[in-house]
Each structure stands twice: as C-alpha cells, then as structure tokens.
Image (spheres, rainbow, N blue to C red):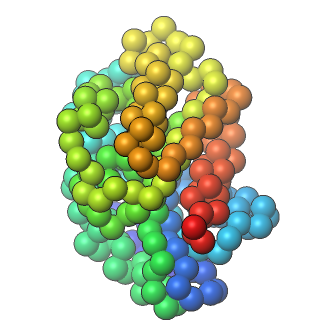
C-alpha cells in the first residue's frame, strides 16, 4: 500500500500485483477502504487496484449542487462535487496510477451514500470512468432525477450497479422517503437505454453492513472485467 495527501485528501493505493488490471476509485466517509478490500480478497474477487480516498469534506465534496439541510441538526450540502472531481481527475488519478503495473484495463468509481450519488454524477462530467457502483446512494437528492433525464453522460458506461437497504425509504422525511422510488426509476432508465445494470435490495436500513454492501458493488463490477 502507498499513501499520499493531495488537497487535504488522504489517498491510499492498494496496487494489484498483476499487470494490465482495472483500477477502482472509492470515496470513503471514514477511511473504510482497507476493510472493503479485505472483504473482497477474502471472497476471492478478481484482482484489481483499489484507490481509496478519505478525509473528504463530505457534504461539500460529494454534493453536485447546493441544498439546505434535509433533516434536523444536519449540515447543508454545499455543492463542491465539480471542484473535487477536478482534483480527483487532474491530481489524484495521475499520482495513484504511478503505482500501476502495465496499463489500466478500465477505471471504475464507487461510493456509499453521498459518495454513491457522486459516483453517478461524475459520469456526466468526465469520460475516464467506464463503470460505477452506487451503494445506498443518496438518490433522494433534490433535482437528481431531473438532472439525469435532461443531461447526457460524457461516455456511456459499460456497467452500473445500484443497491439500497430495504428500510431506507421507511421514513417520514419528505426527501429520504423518495430514495427507493428514485433509485429504481434511475436504474430502469439506464437499463432501458441499453446499459448493463444491477439493482440489489439489501435487508436493513442505511447504516447496516455498509462495508459489505460496498464490497458487493465493487465485486459486481470486478467480476465483469473479462466480458
């Protein structure tokens, strides 16, 4: 593993021993990349390089546009995704891929919660990622369904993975209660537009088995590297 810091973000690179393998970028809330990778390796996942980014300004870096707090005592989301994505593409990716053997066969991006929203949003801003996994993604986010239906991705991805907890929509919060409906609608929209997708409904709420759910989404992407 190699670690470095760029723009106050902590980056951990877990390089693959084999050349010409994929690289998957995982934005994390609390530096859980190491645990996710351990789960994947224990499960016999096909080899790839994992780049985990932590120490994010979560409600700023992962949010595509500004919204007020959506529940009591929450912080607002301040719409810094474009700025962070620029750092990711222009600085983090080139530095991380110095550790890669051979060439990168494909790049994926993955994340949980707001980072799942960011993973999807990034496909509309850059063409460097050809696969994305959004686990319990914040697809309740105001305006996201309208954005998706009115914008075009920079490059059509090969694969998209979505998952959600079965209890996540069971809330009185007017924003959060839309998450399952929105996620299923978005997944269907991409599938009907010819993208190979998956949607997994997991038991539990938003916080249950987050690392296992993250590993499952990444595994689904990695399993398709030979297709």
Residue at the far bottom in the pictured view: 102
* Left or right placement of residue 209 versus residue 54 in this view: right
The residue depicted at 28 percent of the width and 37 percent of the height is 148
Asked if one can make out residue 185 in the rendered structure from this viewpoint, the answer is: yes
Residue at the far top in the pictured view: 172
The residue depicted at 26 percent of the width and 34 percent of the height is 149
Relative depth, front residue between 221 and 14: 221
User: Within the image, what quadrant is residue 164 found in?
Assistant: top right
The residue depicted at 25 percent of the width and 72 percent of the height is 90
Q: 116 above or below 54?
A: above
Q: How many marks?
A: 0
Q: 181 above or below 15?
A: above
x, y percentage for residue 226?
Answer: 60, 71
The residue depicted at 48 percent of the width and 8 percent of the height is 172
**Quadrant holding the N terminus:** bottom right
* Left or right placement of residue 8 versus residue 208 in this view: left
Asked if one can make out residue 27 in the rendered structure from this viewpoint, the answer is: no
x, y percentage for residue 50?
Answer: 55, 69
User: Within the image, what quadrant is residue 46 found in?
Assistant: bottom right
x, y percentage for residue 137?
Answer: 47, 38
Q: 86 above or below 59?
A: below
**Quadrant holding the C terminus:** bottom right
* Left or right placement of residue 166 versus residue 110 in this view: right
x, y percentage for residue 207?
Answer: 61, 33
């Amino acid at each position: 593993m190699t670690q470095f810091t760029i723009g106050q973000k902590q980056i951990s690179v877990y390089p693959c021993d084999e050349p010409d393998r994929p690289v998957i970028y995982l934005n994390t809330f609390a530096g859980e990349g190491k645990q996710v990778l351990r789960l994947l390796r224990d499960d016999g996942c096909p080899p790839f390089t994992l780049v985990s980014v932590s120490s994010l300004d979560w409600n700023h870096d992962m949010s595509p546009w500004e919204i007020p707090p959506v529940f009591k005592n929450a912080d607002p989301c301040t719409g810094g995704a474009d700025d962070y994505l620029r750092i990711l593409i222009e600085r983090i990716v080139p530095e991380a891929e110095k550790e890669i053997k051979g060439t990168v066969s494909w790049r994926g991006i993955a994340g949980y919660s707001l980072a799942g929203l960011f993973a999807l949003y990034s496909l509309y801003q850059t063409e460097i990622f050809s696969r994305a996994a959004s686990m319990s993604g914040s697809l309740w986010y105001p305006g996201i369904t309208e954005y998706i239906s009115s914008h075009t991705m920079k490059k059509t991805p090969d694969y998209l993975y979505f998952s959600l907890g079965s209890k996540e929509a069971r809330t009185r919060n007017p924003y959060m209660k839309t998450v399952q409906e929105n996620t299923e609608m978005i997944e269907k929209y991409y599938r009907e537009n010819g993208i190979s997708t998956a949607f997994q409904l997991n038991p539990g709420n938003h916080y249950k088995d987050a690392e296992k759910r993250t590993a499952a989404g990444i595994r689904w992407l990695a399993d398709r590297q030979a297709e």
